[in-house]
Image: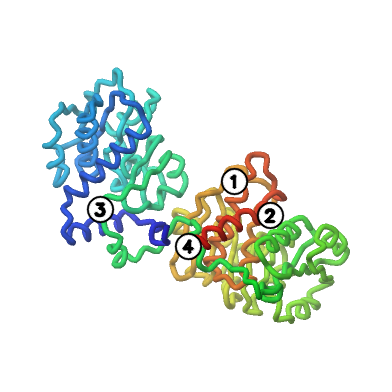
Amino acid sequence: MQAGDLALLTTAQMYQADEAAIAGGIAGTILMEAAGQAVADAIRRRYGRCPVLVLAGPGNNGGDGYVVARLLAAQGWPVRLAALGTPKGDAATMAQAWTGPVVSLDAIDWSGIGLVVDALFGAGLSKLLEGAPRQALEKAEALGLPIVAIDVPSGLSGDTGAVLGYAPRAALTVTFFRGKPGHLLLPGRGLCGDVVLAPIGIPDSVLDAIAPSSWRNAPALWLGTLPRLRPEGHKYGRGHALILGGRMTGAGRLAALAARRAGAGLLSLAVPPGTVDIYAADHPGSIVVDWPDAAALPDILRDPRRNALLIGPGLGVGEETRAAVAAVLATGRPTVLDADAISAFAGDAAGLKSLIRGYCLLTPHEGEFARLFDGQGDRLSRARRAAAWLGATILLKGADSVIAAPDGRAAINHNAPPWLATAGTGDVLAGLALGLLAQGMPVFEAACAACWLHGEAAAGKGPGMIAEDIAPAIPAVLARLERIRRLRG
């Protein structure tokens, strides 16, 4: 898989891809036939032969549905088709090729139906789903019928994952060429069921003009920048990470272990008076130094070999934290701002913006994000706006974490299991990013890799996992990535 395979296209960009393919000599009916074939194949692979009801809209999504109906019927599946309106364009051609009966949505005979194909609107819907289409889909759900959605479940925004009034919960969604943000962003991801991405003949070359800037977060996006261990390497060549720890010692300790597991060659913890023994007790491989007061911070930061910095976990909120953040950012070294380092600037995003120098990564959850930035819009748009305005990379944490760079690039993470929602896992994530930054990984790629590693390690542990379980699982995940990289040469 290549990075281009991970591209996510907006609805408008997907229309652009279709138009470019047609302009290049591929007839729209050929694309529609291929799309319908992909859906019919996916249905046959997953389900046994049963009576199928196809709900077909008037546009291209409906045209795909007419193809599905014809192909399944040709294979001996009992098929009924209910249509909304008069098919248009290429959909009209496909409707003419369907020789079975057609009824309106309010005249459906639901007896004996075993499967419903939602070919009403797909991602092109821009208004609330209501009336007969909504009633038909609600009936299918009420009867407990599996729904196969073409492109996205009708009523779901392909761009944002938001529900436009109502959208059904599909068991399977078949989409084409490239995925859409709405397949990964919640609540859309939870409504799409299993997502099958099918090629339909659109050449990859159309992406050159589209220039997508959003991707599904997976190793192909950043594996080429993941630090490599070399026979001649040594610990000083793998970076020296520094964490400014607080009196809530667990947060900094979790981050420290994660940074070291991510590959940082050395790690220092600067900690408040009276906590040195606590930090040192379970970190014999870390350097623990006393951080008595604000006056001592310049000396701690003076060593240029401490090339990546993390501040925030367990630090507390107040003027002292703001001053420490200012001192850290003034170094211009790659910096991760997490937890209290973000909350300390609540209501004063401009104050934080004025301090940022060099590469900076913020790792807020929704609450911390809302203390700094506008909460209007979907997660992808909000993270993008904040990153561009602040001049820093944003990792907006959640089950659908979004990583956004100041230059407009963004990735959506999708491998986080629900058991990651437990105390301390955010500190581990910040530590993983720190460890990768210390080794020289670019900040956007480091944030993406840290987020994916975090989810992958947690997924392998299973329910009952706690934050302390994640870092020890990282080496096995890194080893797997290294094997993949060797196979690719």
Amino acid found under the numbered disc labelled 3: Gly
Q: Quadrant of the N terminus?
A: bottom left
Compare residues 462 and 316 and report the one nearer the observer. Answer: 462
For the residues labelled 2 and 3, the Cα–Cα distance comes to 43 Å
Label 2 CA crowd tier, 10 Å (few <14, some 14–19, many 20+): many
Q: Are marks 2 and 4 in contact (CB under 8 Å)?
A: no
Sequence-wise, the earlier of marks 1 and 4 is: 1
Q: Looking at the image, is mark 3 or mark 4 nearer the viewer? A: 4
User: How far is mark 3 from mark 4, CA to CA?
Assistant: 26 Å
Q: Position of residue 137 (x, y in %)?
A: 33, 31
Tally the marks. 4
Q: Which residue is mark 2?
A: 471
Q: Which residue is mark 1?
A: 459
Q: Which residue is mark 4?
A: 488
Q: Which is closer to the viewer, label 1 or label 4?
A: 4
- The amino acid marked with disc number 1 is Ala
Measured as percent of width and height from the top left, residue 58 is found at 19, 40
Distance from disc 1 to disc 3, alpha carbons, whole Å, reads 34 Å
Mark 2 or mark 3, whichever is nearer to me: 3
Position of residue 280 relative to residue 38, above or below, is below
Q: Residue at x 66, y 51 (%)?
A: 473
Choose the circle earlier in sequence order: 1 or 3.
3
Taking 265 as reference, is 444 left or right?
A: left
**Mark drawn on residue 45:** none
Q: Nearer the viewer, residue 452 or 185?
A: 452
